[in-house]
Amino acid sequence: MLLVNKGDQRSGWTVTLSFPRGRLVAAWVDGAEQGTASFADGVFTYRSGVDLAPGASVPLRFHFEKTGTTRPTSCTVDGTECSGR
């Protein structure tokens, strides 16, 4: 998943993914300070550890097992539906 700050100010972010039958194995960000992750009741939430500059991007990688699907049933960034799923 590639996160892009399309705004005009530095901004933190929160990603929420739903994998109702999955088990989270690992989550990490490449090229940015690590944030905090939680996984409860099939919902994965990742909060940024650093604000993202306008126009900047950062990849978020995660690994789930036994989800029954390769894609989450829902995906949001700061409450907005993910694009390009």
Image (spheres, rainbow, N blue to C red):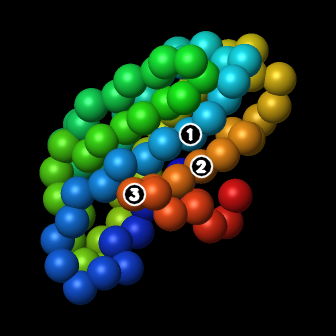
**Which residue corresponds to the image point at 30% horizontal and 81% vertical from the top-left?**
7
* Amino acid at circle 3: Asp
Does residue 51 appear in this view?
A: yes
* Amino acid at circle 1: Leu
Q: Is residue 44 above or below residue 47?
A: above
Q: Secondary structure at mark 1?
A: strand
Residue neighbourhood size for the residue with mark 2, other residues' Cα within 10 Å, grouped as few (<14), some (14–19), many (≥20): many
Does residue 30 appear in this view?
A: no
**Which x, y percent locates residue 2?**
49, 58
Q: Which residue is mark 1?
A: 17
Q: Is residue 43 above or below residue 74?
A: above
Asked if the residue at tag 1 contacts the one at tag 2, i.e. Cβ–Cβ closer than 8 Å, the answer is yes
Q: Secondary structure at mark 3?
A: loop
Q: Could you say which is closer to the camera, residue 30 or residue 84?
A: 84
Judge from the rendering whether residue 76 lies leftward or rightward of residue 53; answer left or right. Answer: right
Judge from the rendering whether residue 76 lies leftward or rightward of residue 29; answer left or right. Answer: right
**Which x, y percent locates residue 43?**
54, 29
**Which x, y percent locates residue 75?**
59, 49
Q: Is residue 82 above or below residue 68?
A: below
- Give the residue at the far bottom of this rendering: 8
Label 3 or label 1, whichever comes before in sequence order: 1
Please tell me the numbered disc located at residue 78: 3
Residue neighbourhood size for the residue with mark 3, other residues' Cα within 10 Å, grouped as few (<14), some (14–19), many (≥20): few
Q: Is residue 52 above or below residue 32?
A: below
Distance from label 2 to label 1 (Cα)? 5 Å
